[in-house]
Image: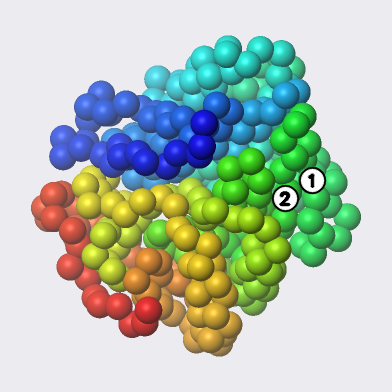
Amino acid sequence: MAPNLDVEWIHGTKSGRPGDEPLLQVHQVDERTFILRQSKNVSYEAPFLHLLIGDRSALLLDTGAVGPVELNPIRATVDQLLAAHPGRRLIVAHTHSHGDHVAGDHQFSNRPDTTVVGRELEAVQQFFGFTDWPNDVVTLDLGGRELEVLAIPGHHRTHIAVYDPQTGFLLTGDTVYPGRLYAFDYPEFMRSVDRLAAFAEDRDVSQLVGSHIEMTTVPGKDYPLGARYQPDEPPLQLEPAALQRLRQRSLALAGKIGKHTFDELIIYNSPGKVMMIREMLRGRLYRIGSRSSPPRNGSASGS
């Protein structure tokens, strides 16, 4: 079964009621690879989660943006998927430790044969075996499926990327995706993107697969922060060339604090309180207005 990303993702409903679309959408990429999306009716973040299954172990990367089981049945969903692959140890890890990626962790605290990787930097380094963070590349062997893991801080100090040779997917979390890239530590973000791009050049990367969709299909237009209905989304995946473009752009934007809009993503260089308040106000105005129309903010400042 070749990797399949031909999918229409749930994207919220006009009603906003949790019961009006699945709480978690499960898409099977291949026999042992699944991507899950949380409903925007539950959380506007609507993160994507990844389940990679090997011969001995399975990796769940991120657990969602809300904790209650009745809104985020991540444990039951993973158990159901792993029922077809019995005997695997489960590893629960995170692209990074922001709240919208770790809220379901507690559901796995008493699950047998399961390791939940801690959220602190030291716990991440110790579990994966980093000895020269953020410069080294380490491996995680699931049994017949060896993943490569590298550190990409900048958005968050614990951020990692995971490369899966089986699918060719480079899982990039909140560092590269079709949306708003918040580079809170811009020098670190710039170095991480450069390292990630160099890493990808030496691998057979088929797709960049991040954790959110925030853009519309109109180049340079995003859904404002907090949008819960996004009927005009582009695909989740980005072509590998997008990483090389991001590398060039991030270097060019060094020292240029602010919001920089491009066709497939937006870079926020060192966003401060004022910038984030503006984004929240824009999102509030959007929610007060029509939920069904793409946003009308701005125009692209580069491509």
- Residue at image position (64%, 41%) is 166
- Residue 192: x %, y % from top left: 66, 67
The image position of residue 235, as x and y in percent, is 36, 51
Please report whichever mark, 2 or 1, sits nearer to the chain's N-terminal start.
Answer: 1
- 268 to 150, vertically: above or below: below
Task: Out of 160 and 206, give the one closest to the viewer.
Answer: 206
Q: Residue 205: x, y in percent?
A: 60, 55
Which label sits on residue 220? Answer: none
Q: Note whether residue 101 is visible.
A: yes
Q: Is residue 229 left or right of residue 162?
A: left
Q: Which mark is residue 149?
A: 2
Residue, x 24% and y 57% (percent of image)?
A: 284
The answer to whether residue 97 of the structure is visible from this angle is no
Disc 2 to disc 1: CB gap under 8 Å:
yes
Residue pointed to by mark 1: 139
Is 20 located above or below residue 45 in the figure?
above
Which residue is found at the position 59% from the left and 18% from the top? 82
